Structure formats: structure tokens, C-alpha cells
Image (tube, grey):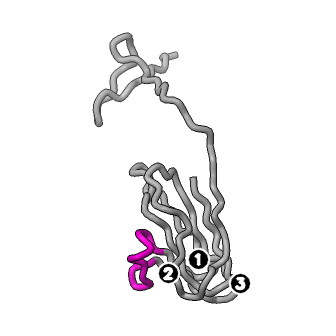
Amino acid sequence: MPSAELYVQTDPNVFKPVSYDHPIPVDSAPRDPAWSTNLSGPIEEANVFQVVQAATPGRRGGTIQNQFSNSSPMWVFLGPLADAAKDKSLYLRPGDPPFSLSLGAHGTIPDEICVAGQKGEVFFALFQ
């Protein structure tokens, strides 16, 4: 029966058998414990943008969802509150899939997160 060899990637398209010269890489960087911040809440004033979370360069991820009880849309703006406008925002209807701040292997969107909609309606916002 042939033995299975382990390989390590040494360059983007180069794999070499694990050896003394090509050991298995070990990531010894310290890890922060997993954490999440739930910033869900109501829209404070109808059709006026409000900040959900300030710009966060170290943000690991996030999700925003329109959980309004009626058919009202919600707008999500990524950037400074002073620049927030509906025509520059994401349009989310109740029942739409959550909007993810993840950019996959490229990290997450670090911008300030602002929302607008109908007063009193509740949105879901969870950040890591």
C-alpha cells in the first residue's frame, strides 16, 4: 500500500513534500476569543439615517437585515453619516437575505454603517 505524503505550499503554484527544509507552517499568532456585538434596534426617526456602528478597521464581519413588520424598505449606507443618501445606499426589503459585510478572503468592510427606514421599525445588526 503506498504511503500518503504531506505537501506544503512554498509558492502560489508550487507544492513540495514536507521535510526538514519544508516544514508544515505553524501559525503561532495569539488569537482573540470569539465575540459578537448585537446592535439591532429600532429606526429612531423616519427616513433619517442613523449610525449603527462607527467605522471599525478591525471589524471581522457583520450582518444587517431588514426585519420590519410591514412592507417598508430599509436603506443601508456604508460611509460617513454626513454623506448618507438613499440614492447611494443598499435597498433592503423585509424578507430579503441579510447583507454581509464580509469580503471573503479580503476581510470586511470597515466603513461606518448607517441605516434609514420607517420610525419604530426594527433592524437586525450583528458585528464581529
Q: Is residue 85 magenta?
A: yes
Three-letter code for the amino acid on which mark 2 is drawn: Tyr
Identify residue for label 1.
96
Q: Residue at x 50, y 75 (%)?
A: 76
Identify residue for label 3.
69
Rendering coords of residue 48 (x, y %): 53, 84
* Among the 4 quarters of the image, the one containing residue 23: top left
Distance between mark 1 and mark 3 Cα atoms: 13 Å
Identify residue for label 2.
91
Callout 2: SS:
strand
Q: Is residue 101 above or below residue 128?
A: below
Distance between mark 2 and mark 1 Cα atoms: 10 Å
- 80 lies left or right of 114: left
Three-letter code for the amino acid on which mark 1 is drawn: Asp
Q: Which mark sits nearer the N-terminus, 2 or 1?
A: 2
Rendering coords of residue 44 (x, y %): 63, 80
Three-letter code for the amino acid on which mark 3 is drawn: Ser
Q: Nearer the viewer, residue 97 or 28?
A: 28
Rendering coords of residue 42 (x, y %): 66, 76
Which contiguous range is marked in magenta? 77-89
- 120 lies left or right of 1: right
Residue that lies at the very extreme toward the front in this rendered image: 82
* Among the 4 quarters of the image, the one containing residue 40: bottom right
Q: Which mark sits nearer the N-terminus, 2 or 3?
A: 3
Q: Residue at x 62, y 43 (%)?
A: 34
